[in-house]
Image (spheres, rainbow, N blue to C red):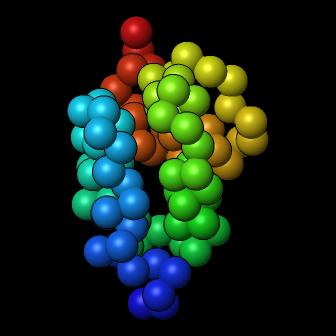
Amino acid sequence: MSEKYDLRKIKWRSRRGMRELDALCDRYLANHFESAPNAEKDLYLTLLDMQDPELYSLLMHRAEYPTPEIKALVLKMNPDLLDE
């Protein structure tokens, strides 16, 4: 695996200090990241560049999705709230 996708570093970078974000990021990393295509991994890394309130709104399905790819990733990260 390349340095860019070093899971240990990405886990550290994924720590947000907000319980809900940490749980969703941890679950995605544990269940999907390693088997994801590079384009999805890059998209996840892009999400990590967001500020916590913006990322929280996306992951809680309270904000509009900027692209269909981001929507697909967010739905993979947090499918639980779709039925509410």
In the figure, is residue 21 to the left or right of 53? left
In the figure, is residue 71 to the left or right of 24? right
Residue 77 pos. (x, y %): 41, 43
* Residue found at x 34% / y 26%: 80
* Furthest-top residue in this view: 84
Residue 53 pos. (x, y %): 51, 27
In the figure, is residue 10 to the left or right of 67? left
Residue 7 pos. (x, y %): 34, 74
* Furthest-bottom residue in this view: 2
Q: How many marks?
A: 0
- Residue 70 position (above or below residue 39): above
Residue 20 pos. (x, y %): 29, 31
In front of the other: 49 or 70: 49
- Residue 76 position (above or below residue 6): above
Tell me if I can see residue 6 in this picture: yes
Tell me if I can see residue 24 in this picture: no
Quadrant assignment for the N terminus: bottom left
- The answer to which image quadrant residue 54 occupies is top right
Quadrant assignment for the C terminus: top left
* Residue found at x 68% / y 24%: 64
In front of the other: 83 or 48: 48
* Residue found at x 61% / y 56%: 46
* Residue found at x 35% / y 37%: 21
